[in-house]
Amino acid sequence: MKICLSGLTASGKTTIAERLSVELNIAHISKSKAKSYGHFVEDSRIKGNDRIIETAHPRYANSFDKEIARLAKKQDCVISTWLSPWIITGPALRVWLNANEKDRLSRSAKRRHMSLKEAKAYVEMKDREAMRSFKRIYGINVMEHDIFDIEINTSHMHIDDVVSVIAMMAVLKDSKRFR
């Protein structure tokens, strides 16, 4: 069973993936794995001492994504990277997580200990730069959702309900395994 979670910044990818991995007793593969592969580079174009945005560097993107795919191939897992629905081949549940701007900014501000104004600048830049990088490196427009099995608005559902819906969908999609 492979579950690929994608969505814009602060839509809930990591939080939901962590809960799903516990609920389903499967591994969680996230962008933190990428740190050791040099895929993400810090870019502090917004003034201040905070490291503001992580953008994909073309030189490392391919090796990182191959490593994520390799790790996912070996095990049942939930993958919480923006591009996982496109890089994971074979059967998988592909989920796009939506959240309204107010919730995304609030989550990002809380997580990064910044004001809502700083969070707005951070989220807008991160989304814009990530989408530009994915288009340039892979030709992928992450806003085209035709590959997704389901889209969930995380602003309108409690996290427990989101996890339950995704877990149920994963079991249904992988029903042969549970017969």
Image: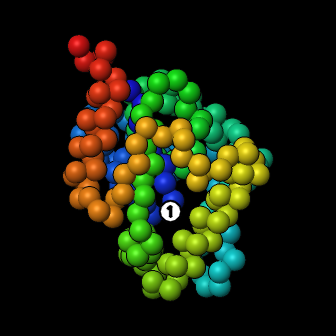
Picture quadrant of residue 62: top right
Quadrant location of the C terminus?
A: top left
Indicate the position of residue 107 as horizontal and vertical percent values: 39, 71
Quarter residue 76 falls in: top left
Question: Of residues 100 and 30, which is closer to you in this image?
Answer: 100
User: In this rendering, is residue 142 above or below 179?
Assistant: below
141 w.r.t. 79: above or below: below
Q: Which residue is mark 1?
A: 9
Mark 1 packing: few (<14 Cα in 10 Å), some, or many (20+)? Answer: many
Q: Residue at x 57, y 79 (%)?
A: 121
Residue 44, x across and y down, in percent: 66, 74
Q: Residue at x 45, y 85 (%)?
A: 115
Measuring from the top left, give residue 156's x and y in whole percent.
29, 62
Q: Residue at x 54, y 71 (%)?
A: 123
- Looking at the picture, which amino acid does disc 1 mark? Thr
Q: Secondary structure at mark 1?
A: loop
Residue 14 in view here = no
* Residue 55, above or below 121: above
